[in-house]
Amino acid sequence: MTVLEEGIARPHAPERASAWEVVHDWVTTVDHKKLGVMYISSALVFFLIAGFEATLMRIQLAVPNNDFLPPNTFNRLFTMHGTTMVFLVGMPMFFGFANYLTPLMIGARDLAFPRMNAFGFWLFLFGGILLYFSFLGGDGLYGAGTAPDVGWFAYAPLTGKAFSRGNSTDYWILGILVSGFGSTGTALNLAATILTMRCPGMTWGKLPLFVWLMLVNCLLTLIILTPLTAAQVMLLFDRYLGAHFFDTQAGGSAVLWQHFFWFFGHPEVYVLILPAFAMANEIVPVFSRKPLFGYPFMVGATVLIGFISLSVWAHHMFVVGLSPAANTFFTLSTMAIAVPTGIKIFNWLGTMWGGKIRFKMPMLWCTAFLFSFVIAGLTGVMLAVVPWDWQLSDSYFVVAHFHFVLIGGLLFNIFAAIYYWFPKVTGRMLDEKLGRLHFWIFATGFYLTFTTMHFPGLLGMPRRIYTYEAGRGWDTLNLITSLGVAVQLVGLTFFLWNVVRSLLKGDPAGDDPWDAWTLEWSTTSPPPEYNFEQIPVVHSRRPLWDLKHPEDPDWRYE
Amino acid sequence: MQGWNVARARMTSASASPIAKRCRRSGRLHLTGAARTTVSAVATCVLQAAHALAADGPVNAIPNMFAPVSPPAEGIRSLSFLVMAIAAGIFVTVTAVLFWCVWRYRARSDDEHEPPQVYGSNQIEWSWTIVPVLIVLVLFLATARTINELQASDVPPEALRVTIVGHQWWWEIKYPDLGVVTANELHLPVSRDGARRPTYLHLESADVIHSFWLPQLSGKTDVVPNRRNLMWMEPNQTGVFLGQCAEYCGTQHAKMLLRAIVHEPAEFDGWVAAQKKPAAVVDTVAAGRAVFQSTACINCHTVDGTNANGRFGPDLTHLMSRTTIGSGAAANTPENLRAWIDSPDHFKPGVLMPAMKLDDGDLDELTAYLLTLK
């Protein structure tokens, strides 16, 4: 145990660096912590951009027959909103938190390939900038279109030259392709790190669950980005080299694109949500003051989710006219994935049961996550019921469902994680009072918007329409949905204010403000560049518990 | 396939279809006791909400999937009630436990001791694995059965056959057995016990993917280029039912509306007879006809018996028998028709029909001509 105490390094008083030195330092860094912070900050910027796009769309849809936005603009906005949120917010959030925390949690000094790590980040960032450059350069040579307007899953043949003139679709392809290369590299890097660089004593059974989930997530990422990249290259061939993979007018197949895309796209949803589970796995136990209930089952459930998620993709395609046999298979696989997901929720509840739960900001968000995710899971099961999906597919019900997953599930836990690890990253606490305003206002807005959004779907409102007629029963529901967005924006303002204010004059955090148990809390806040002066040795899943409770260490029970 | 054939055989017998019968039992398929009560409660809530919203408009203004009038949509509703009942049960149980934990196990400010450290329990883990597995099994079997009952595979001989061709951004509707071609408004006969009139639709696309969705009549099916999908409906109520394209298909996806008009059988036969007549020739609008036939109109539109035989836009032979123009973008009134020809972008920005830049006189004459195409 003494090794751990010695591992705690004190930072030296930093000398004041010039602005140029600071910029140079960040741009040239290969430090996993700085890259993690850059991933998360870039993702937050893209989040604000995509949120702004969503706000414009909700203004347009607040009342029927609105002409606030012309149809093409609206179509570009939902394409950019979806693409941004998935590829430029969800993915970099995953890589950001994984980057920052994985080495700290496994007692390593950096990732396995630090330079490749930096390369992956810059590919992601410039891929995103390339996508957004389409707003300026998308006119290309043909003078048609600016940002892509083909939807985030870019169904063929709408993306073919015949229907998508100009270069906007090319920006979509290349932007995502480039950032995809970055993702592949970083996923490989993280997996290699977890496989080979765990500190002495950290066997697979003692690995923090956060890291377990990141490993599964990296392997999933490696598997699924391949077909997406292949499909995008095929699409480029169609557009520029006269190939006919997806060109239906020359015998190509529109359904082929959907198979490729969703073979990527559905596991991608799990790639987005597993980090949220990973965060909950760390936060719920610490604030319940108990170890995570059923660790081996949580690991098993995660691995199972990883495997099953590779065989559910065609549930996005129940309406394209698959055979009854195919529909039946994919309904079974899709429902099957509810079982390990349910096990996770039960285990979090089992962790809270009998604990002494401290409702600090991270735990508040995690609790709201649990509540939202139950709803998201149940509407997911509804969508898995093929005949009902024939009604629900491509309606606002689906839109509400996946926003419950990605906001109520993912974003709530990202907020939780930011409140939880901000002290570690910056050395300062986020303000609890502003945090509570942020939580209650944002959560109210979220439930107002997205609970309501289910109902126009049940009443026949398809997604991706820029306007609708009055009198279909959608008017009031859409107005409430849009008003909820305004409430969310107010909540978000408190969050941003909190971050800025706390960065400048938040309370000093100390090394271990939450009385937590994993290795990152054993070093300083912020950690030194080398993380640990001496590589720690662990004997259980909760090394800091062992340290704090030498009379009753975990390794006696595990 | 076997299940489907059995279902078909029973449907074509003299009595009502098994699906229709089940739905008359208020969708309480497979359920007993407490589940039955829950289903009724959920169903009542949903339907009350729907009715409250429906209060202002005509009966079928709301394309509500919980107000089905055709066996595929009714079968889906029955299944959805089962699923909602199970989901409601799970939701209440899990959130009750969550709120109990939040309330019972919240930390008190005066308590500094750590709680007992519990690491897990295999019995509990296995039990909350097996129970969801059983629930999933029930849901899966109910779903598999409904897929087999509802998914169209063979077209029965007595069925009315319709071919739907999706275009950017309108619907071509053809009745190959009847020799009728129209657009955007699907006319169907009502199906009654003893005089069953199921309709089978072949779905094709001329350009990109669309999706054909009339929620009260059936679930949606995608309209995929280079592919022929099949769906069926069998409305048991007359009236007008609304729907629209459900797969994003480009600029004007939002205004690719769809309506189904369900007639009494005799009325339907009358509509068919009227549609089969050649285009009206009225001498007083000869000038307008000349404008039509000498501009680019004829490259895209067909008027039977004239030199206008374009296939790119809707068939105009019986234009005035339709209640809307621009695939539901506007009501088919003389003023709207004139404004539409003058500037199609006014009602439907981005529509592929160009403004022909006609002067006012030509525009009036052309409109007058089109108004005679009854």
Image: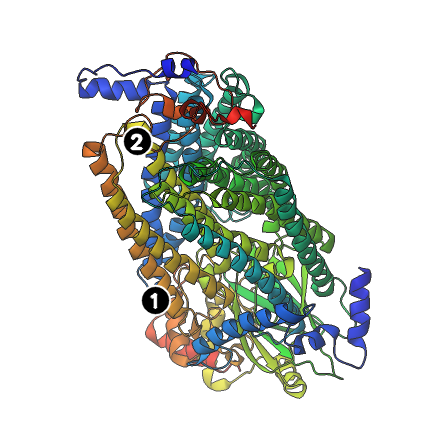
Disc 1: which chain? A
| Quadrant (top left, top right, bottom left, bottom right) of the N terminus of chain B | bottom right
Pick the front one: A295 or B239: A295
Q: Which residue is mark 2?
A: A423
Which mark, residue A53? Answer: none
A8 to A285, vertically: above or below: above
Q: Going 39% across and 72% down the picture, which residue do you hit?
A: A470
Please give the count of numbered marks on the rendered protein.
Answer: 2
| Nearer the observer, B45 or A203 | A203
In the displayed structure image, the side of residue A424 where residue B168 appears, left or right: right
Nearest to N terminus: mark 2 or mark 1 = 1
Disc 2: host chain = A
Q: Quadrant of residue A392?
A: bottom right
Q: Are marks 2 and 1 in contact (CB under 8 Å)?
A: no
For residue B263, say whether it is visible.
yes
Few, some or many residues within 10 Å of mark 2 (<14, 14–19, 20+)? many
Q: Which residue is mark 1?
A: A63
Looking at the picture, tell me which residue is in the foreground, B264 or B312: B264
Q: Residue at x 46, y 86 (%)?
A: B284
Q: CA distance from mark 2 to mark 1?
A: 43 Å
The image shows residue A34, relative to residue A486, as above or below, that is above
Which callout, 2 or 1, points to the residue nearer the camera? 2
Residue B163: % across, % down: 65, 66
